[in-house]
Image: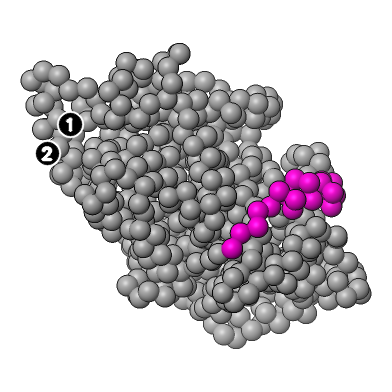
Amino acid sequence: MSAHRRACGIAARLVLALAALTTLSGCAVDRLHARRAAATAAAAQDRTLECSAVDACAIASPYADLVGQAQRDSRAQAPVHYVNLLDRGEDSLLLRIHLVRSARKSIDVQTFIFAEDDAGYLMLDELVKAARRGVKVRVIVDQLFSLDDVELLAQLARAHVNFELRVYNPTFHKARTPPLEFAAGILCCFFQFNQRMHNKLLLIDGAIGIAGGRNYENRYFDWDDDFDYRDRDVLVIGPATESMRTSFEQFWRHPRSVALSRLRDVSARILADGVDAPAYAVHAYRNAQRVATLSRLADDPEYIRSHFAAPSLRVGAAEYFSDAPDKPVAPDQPRDNQLSNHIIELLRGAQSQIILQTPYLVLSRKARQVFAGLHRQRPQLRVMVSTNSLAATDAFYVYALSYKYKKRDLKLGFEIHEFKPFPDEAADLVANYAELGENDGGTGARYRKYGQAPLSRHGVRLGLHAKSIVIDDATALIGSHNFDPRSDYYNTESGFIIHDHAFADALRASILRDSAPGSAWTVARRPRSGVFSRLSNSISDFSTALPIFDLWPFRYATSYQIKPGCSPLPPSDPRFYDCYEDVGDFPEVNLPLKTIYTRIVTAFGAGLHSIL
């Protein structure tokens, strides 16, 4: 048999296997089986309460005073909110654990990723402990990147009568999605498979809410040994939390939020374990000392008061926006695309300055139209963008698309600053965690797993994951929306919009730190001189306009680093090229193949923006 015939035979068998898997796996668990699994889990559920007190033995929290103050002072036309900007990852995790322990009645959690590492296990353990002392706990996770250990999920199904977890949009009605089923999901049901719940929400007693960009995984809380995210949340107390409650209820009741007993693999495990299965047990942590330190601080009300409650800002208008669970089915309905539409309206009203931070600078068509209109109508409007470099991103395919359209973004008047993997302000963090990484066998495994670009130096790399906007130093947005086509059309998103000068100033200062020369490279056009430069620019324009075969290697823009002794300047300043030196398109990337891959995606991947 020829090699060609063998290859055709293998391909045919793969297609048949995928078709069979699609047919067989597409069947939801039948109602009788689901009822049996639910009854088995319920019979095995722990129903004992470790506390009989009215407050469920909640720890004392200084935030209780702020809740009461906001309720007393708020009026229908003059709401009062208290807010904390949460920039540091470990602070954000510590505060979450404190608030979970302070809960008296209810805890609602919604997230895109729930990982099985120290941060994820710690949060799970604390939620189950809260349920055992009498707090009603509900959790919604997006299925694709959350908790795929079927035995763990079966344990959670019977952990306690006060604890319930639902999985949003499960592929083939299962908790796990192995690679073959992942491929089958794309082939058979791409539209549904491609739509994800990207919301992040924590709501304590319906009164204290946290929303932003963080998922439950070590890297979102500065706990990863190799790669941590520069991310951001906001804590809000006040009337806006009622909108959080309403949004969570919509997702909780939606048909795409599936109980564990209705998942094919989990229900089978529940039935196999029976009613005498082992109870949920608190996890052993990889870095137990770090967990113990954070746990001790989370129990200390004076620490929480001095570091969080006391510095909180009193603000007026704060709004929580969330897309509806059925957004992708009817994306043009205002209620289903609430956050995207509100962001667009805010941008259109900008008069002097927009500061935007996003990990992925791949704008949707609607966003491009808005920025183009602003550039025509208000050429003096400053638009500053903080985003990832290739060296900092964990999604180089997406970076490759942003690389393709750098000229278009610069022509819109953007000042682009690309985040460095080792920013100056994070030097201590890098040094501390570099030692941990060496002791744990190096960093190669995670580079391969997450598609990160191998770098020219070692240590804990940082990448941007924060999604924030400041408009005219008056309005601030912090949420899960990446301001890209996925966020506009496919994922459900959520976030807070806060109308307050002091809070906007704090957020603006935070983004500017990430954009300073020690933390970011500046993207600017290459100087034009000579016939070749002008010819290259014309060919580059033509090449970029092509949907495929964008192969011209000489791009319009590149990265620049400030020279010693110079002060920061915008690329529009005539002195810019005297004070900045060209450091190439992909500074600090130490693997030629990665740059080649990036250029290939740039050339052939223009149609993938909605998938990536």
> Within 10 Å of the Cα at label 1, are there few (<14), some (14-19), or many (20+) other Cα atoms?
some
Q: Secondary structure at mark 2?
A: helix
- Residue 414 at x, y percent in the picture: 32, 40
Q: Is residue 314 magenta?
A: yes
Residue closest to the far bottom: 32
Identify the residue shown where x is 25% and y is 44%.
379
Q: Is residue 283 visible?
A: no
Q: Quadrant of the N terminus?
A: top left
Q: Amino acid at mark 1?
A: Trp
Q: What is the CA distance from the residue labelled 2 to the residue labelled 1? A: 9 Å
Which of pointers 2 and 1 indicates the residue nearer the eye? Answer: 2
Q: Is residue 497 left or right of residue 487?
A: right
Coloration of the structure image: one colour
- Residue 524 at x, y percent in the picture: 30, 29
Identify the residue shown where x is 77% and y is 39%.
290
Per the rendering, the mark at residue 205 is none
Residue closest to the far top: 565
Identify the residue shown where x is 74% and y is 53%.
309
What residue is pinned by disc 2? 542
State which region is magenta. Answer: 295-316
State yes or no: discs 2 and 1 in contact (Cβ < 8 Å): yes
What residue is pinned by disc 1? 552
Identify the residue shown where x is 36% and y is 54%.
350
